[in-house]
Image: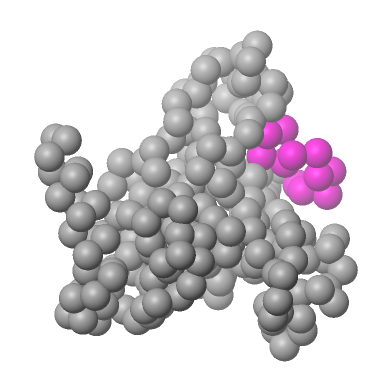
């Protein structure tokens, strides 16, 4: 897992969007499996990447259809397994109509955490080998997020993951942390290694967690 860290507006989301090829870089290139992204067929690339934003969109439809997302080739087994990985199944089964419960503007209201987990299940249901989460677990409590990561690692151990998160538990799991400032990578390494440097990562990490303590 590669985690991106930095202050608001430093370019974390833009980098994830470049990796997803929502737009192309103005200079240089991004390489995926030895091939420049520009040379990938967009449809093939989209199938390989599961992308979830911080505030994902849900449709006025059933939970099941929000996960399958109009992809007729996604079987019921995949909907259920991706829901299980996303720590969603138990809660959905408690809904009046289970996975056939309507949500969205004219349906049942779901919490921010449920919304994010439905969107993560949607991303996983497509069977991607790259998962991109742009602060997409921000509404989950620490215990649920930890269980989500454990489920992903156990079910899909070879999944390549790019994540934006402020949580220490997530950053500590990362194989590599890229620290961005003003659109540039200024530091990289593991969590403790970067803290020991007492540089940009150290500064933003303790500033963020000090703010959280003051708000509690």
| Quarter of the rendering containing residue 76 | top right
Residue 132 visible: no
Taking the spot 37% from the left edge, 56% from the top edge, the residue there is 7
**Residue 165: x %, y % from top left:** 39, 55
Q: Can you see residue 141?
A: yes
Query: In the image, what residue occupies the spot 18% across and 59% down?
Result: 206
In this picture, is 128 found above or below 67?
Answer: below
Q: Quadrant of residue 111?
A: top left
The quadrant of the rendering that contains the C terminus is top left
Q: Please state which of residues 56 and 204 is positioned toward the viewer in this rendering.
A: 204
Residue found at x 72% / y 33%: 65
The percent coordinates of residue 122 (x first, y second) are 64, 45
Residue 47 in magenta stretch: no
Depth check: give the residue in front, 135 or 153.
Answer: 135
Q: Residue at x 72, y 88 (%)?
A: 34
Query: In the displayed structure, would residue 113 be above or below residue 212?
Result: above
Name the residue nearer the viewer: 148 or 7: 7
Characterize the magenta stretch by its predominant secondary structure: loop
Q: Report the span colored magenta.
A: 65-75
């Amino acid at each position: 897992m590669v985690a991106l860290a930095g202050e608001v507006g430093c370019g974390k989301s833009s980098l994830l969007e470049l990796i997803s090829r929502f737009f192309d870089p103005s200079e240089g290139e991004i390489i995926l499996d030895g091939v420049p992204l520009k040379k990938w067929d967009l449809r093939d690339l989209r199938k390989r990447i599961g992308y979830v934003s911080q505030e994902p969109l849900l449709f006025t439809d059933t939970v099941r259809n929000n996960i399958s997302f109009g992809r007729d080739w996604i079987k019921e087994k995949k909907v259920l397994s991706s829901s299980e990985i996303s720590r969603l199944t138990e809660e959905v089964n408690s809904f009046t109509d289970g996975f056939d419960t309507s949500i969205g503007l004219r349906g049942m209201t779901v919490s921010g955490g449920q919304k994010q987990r439905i969107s993560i299940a949607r991303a996983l249901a497509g069977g991607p080998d790259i998962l991109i989460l742009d602060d997409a677990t921000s509404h989950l409590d620490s215990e649920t997020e930890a269980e989500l990561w454990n489920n992903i690692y156990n079910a899909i151990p070879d999944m390549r993951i790019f994540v934006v998160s402020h949580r220490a538990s997530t950053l500590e799991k990362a194989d590599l942390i890229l620290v961005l400032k003003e659109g540039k990578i200024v530091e990289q390494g593991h969590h403790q290694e970067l803290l020991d440097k007492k540089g940009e990562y150290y500064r933003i990490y303790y500033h963020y967690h000090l703010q959280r303590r003051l708000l509690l």
